[in-house]
Each structure stands twice: as C-alpha cells, then as structure tokens.
Image: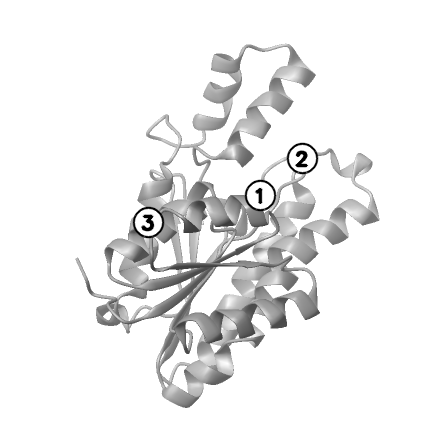
Amino acid sequence: MTVLTGKHAVVTGGASGIGAAVVDGLLEAGANVTIMGRNLMALREKADEHDNIFAAQCDVTDEEMVAKAFEQARDAFGPIDVLVNNAGQAVSLPFKKTTLKDFQLMLDVNLTGSFLCIQNCLEGMVSRESGRIINIASTAALKGYAYVSAYTAAKHGLLGLTRALSLEVAAKGVTVNCVCPGFTDTEIARKAVKNIMEKTGRSAKEAQAELSAHNPQKRFVLPSEVADTVLWIADDRSSAINGQAVAVAGGEI
C-alpha cells in the first residue's frame, strides 16, 4: 500500500505505543514521517529504523519548541500533509485529590498541545487546499470514566476543537477528525494496571481484566488497530470523513 507516497506526515509522541504503530503504517503507505516527542534518544532510536523518518525533539506544551520543531520538519521533508496529534498523558486520581496543577497538566498536554501543533501547519494546508489533521483522543472524549476527570475533560475538549475546526476548513480541502481508542495495549494502560494493583491489592491479571471489561470484546485494543484507522482517514479517498469521532473500542461506545 503506497497511497501516501510523497506525502509528509508529522506524528507527535511517535516513538512508542500508538504513535510508533501509526509511524510504521504511514511508512508502509509511502509517506515521509517526522516524529516528535520529548525523549530525543527514543526518537532517534525509532528514526534509525527507516530512512524516511526525521526526529524532532518537542514538548507540545511549549509554544516555542513546537514552532521550532515544525520548522525543522518542513526543512527535512517539505510542507506537512498529515498531522497526527498523538502526544498525550493520563493522571488517575479521585477528583477530591486532583490539584489545579494536575488539571492544568492534562489540559496542556492533551488539548493545548494539539492546538499549538495545528496552528503550526494549518495555514499551509489551507493554502494548498489539501491536508489531514487527525487527533488521537480516547473513548474518554465520548463518555466519562471515574478517577480521570481531568483527562476526560481534556479529551472532551479535544473533540470539541475537532468538531469546530472541521467546519471552518470543510470547504478548503482539509479534514479534521478524532480517533478515539478504548483501553489500548500501551504504556498508559500498563501504568493504569499497576495503579490498580497498588491501590487494591489485585493481581495483574485481575487489574487488566477490570480495564478490558469496558470493551465488549473483553480485551485491550492493539496499537496497530488504531493505526489502521488513522491510515484510513489519512487516505485521499477519505475526503468526506470530516468532524468525526471514530471509536476503536470493540463496541464500548
């Protein structure tokens, strides 16, 4: 499959988990890919796997770093055709123990970071009348979960941003969509399992079963399954898919 040959895609949080799976899919589809993240060593290890990857260190909550990283990306591979806002973080706390610092961090990483990245590539997409913005949200953008109120609020905000922006650019050749995975086999899910074990004394198997029970298929979603959905939306043939929240969750939503 080479439907993205010659395209330039940017993936934030692209060194591991869902981001790394998305990068692999984009490369298979023929794209040049810039990966961004805070851990430059991890980015370079991923970039060493393929000639068509450029690594740019970036904290998506830092406006100046984001601008610099996107400038480096354009220097490496030219105008940006596809943006995958994947960088994210989750804090699990009861609401009464959630501090303003915790709440602000969730907004900064999961919402404002996507806003800043979009700002740095949208103008070019509109001028070329071509572009795909794909925000990796969560089923937490579509429903509530206990003990992650700040994360859920941020992901709801990301979906709102997606829906509003999709209307602004609908007639300009650009689409904006959300992909909303359920619990996925990533480091975030593994940390959630560990948190349950520490707080409840349950075994790893029991803790994982509690999380996977949200999915009617009784399993974690695979990163590759999320990546396949991203690739479908990034394809030029998906130009009518706009302003959507595509759940990859085995029927949970």
Quarter of the image for the N terminus: give it. bottom left
Rendered location of residue 72, percent (x, y): 53, 70
- Do callouts 3 and 1 mark residues in contact (Cβ within 8 Å)? no
Amino acid type of the residue that numbered disc 1 sits on in the rendered structure: Gly
The residue that label 3 is drawn on is 24
- Label 2 amino acid? Ser
Q: Check the image and name the residue furthest to the bottom.
A: 127
Q: Amino acid at mark 3?
A: Asp
- Seen in the image, is 185 located left or right of residue 68? left
Residue at 49% of width from left, 49% of height from top? 44
Kindly report which numbered mark, 3 or 1, lies closer to the viewer in this rendering.
3
**Apparent side of residue 156 relative to residue 100 in the rendered image (left or right):** left
Tell me the distance, in whole angstroms, between the alpha carbons under discs 3 and 1: 31 Å
Q: Which residue is mark 2?
A: 92
Where's residue 65, x and y in %? 66, 65
Q: Secondary structure at mark 2?
A: loop
Q: Which residue is mark 1?
A: 144
Which element type, helix, strand or loop, lies under badge 3? Answer: helix
Q: Which mark is residue 123?
A: none
Q: Nearer the viewer, mark 3 or mark 2?
A: 3
Along the line of sight, which residue is nearer the eye, 20 or 89?
20
Sequence-earlier tag: 3 or 2: 3
Residue 133 coordinates in the image, percent (x, y):
43, 68
Q: Earlier in the sequence, mark 3 or mark 1?
A: 3
